[in-house]
Image (tube, helix red, strand yellow):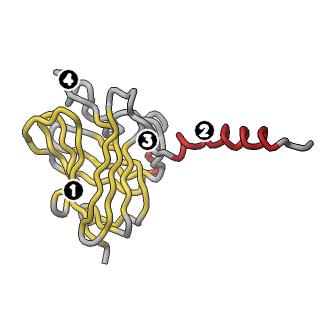
Amino acid sequence: MRFKYPTYLMLIALLALVALPVLAGRGDDANRKSKNGKTAGTIDEVEVTVEYGRPNVKDREIWGALVPYGKVWRTGADEATAITFGADVLVEGQALAAGTYGLFTIPGESEWTFIFNNVAEQWGAFDYSDAEDALRVDVTPQASEHVEAMDFAIEGSSVVLRWEKLAVGFSVAAAE
């Protein structure tokens, strides 16, 4: 079978239109209620990037209600939050190899667990499997000023999640 030049170009254009959303990571957020967020910076000479959905509080009860205590949470909206480390690191003193991970949490009233899962690209936590966990660390949440749209920040040697009236983070250092 022989392709005509215009047919060939149309096929390439169609393939490009199908492939581009897949290559775009979290994708266009123009029609999303929870906009995409991205935080990038350097901790101890290691590049750290967090990509996430930014849900809003919107006068809702968040902790223990919208986000239940004791259950795995995607740590944001829509796709699971992804975190990338450009080199091997220590998270809360525990070794984690360079790479991209799904960043999940198990919120609690007095303690949270951050989970670094080997499956970075997944929708929500619907297909989350603890068999794919690379690391889990426990941390203590802190009271904070109100933040309407969930946000991650790199603050000194920590990655910190802020939402509603809560801040919770974990320390990062370059592995030796």
Residue holding disc 1: 154
Residue holding disc 3: 26
Indicate which disc, 4 or 3, sits on the residue closer to the N terminus.
Answer: 3
Work out how far the residue at label 2 is from the one at label 3, CA to CA, in angstroms: 16 Å
**In the rendered image, which quarter is residue 134 located in?**
bottom left
Which dot, 2 or 1, sits closer to the camera? 2
Work out how far the residue at label 1 is from the one at label 4, CA to CA, in angstroms: 25 Å
At mark 3, the secondary structure is loop
**In the rendered image, which quarter is residue 35 located in?**
top left
Decide: few, some or many residues near mark 1? Use Cα within 10 Å; few <14, some 14-19, many ≥20.
many
Q: Residue at x 49, y 37 (%)?
A: 127
- Kindly identify the amino acid type of the residue bearing the numbered disc 3: Arg
Residue holding disc 2: 17
Q: Residue at x 8, y 41 (%)?
A: 144
Work out how far the residue at label 4 is from the one at label 3, CA to CA, in angstroms: 23 Å
Which quadrant holds the C terminus? Answer: bottom left
Residue holding disc 4: 58
Pointers 2 and 1 in contact (C-beta within 8 Å) = no
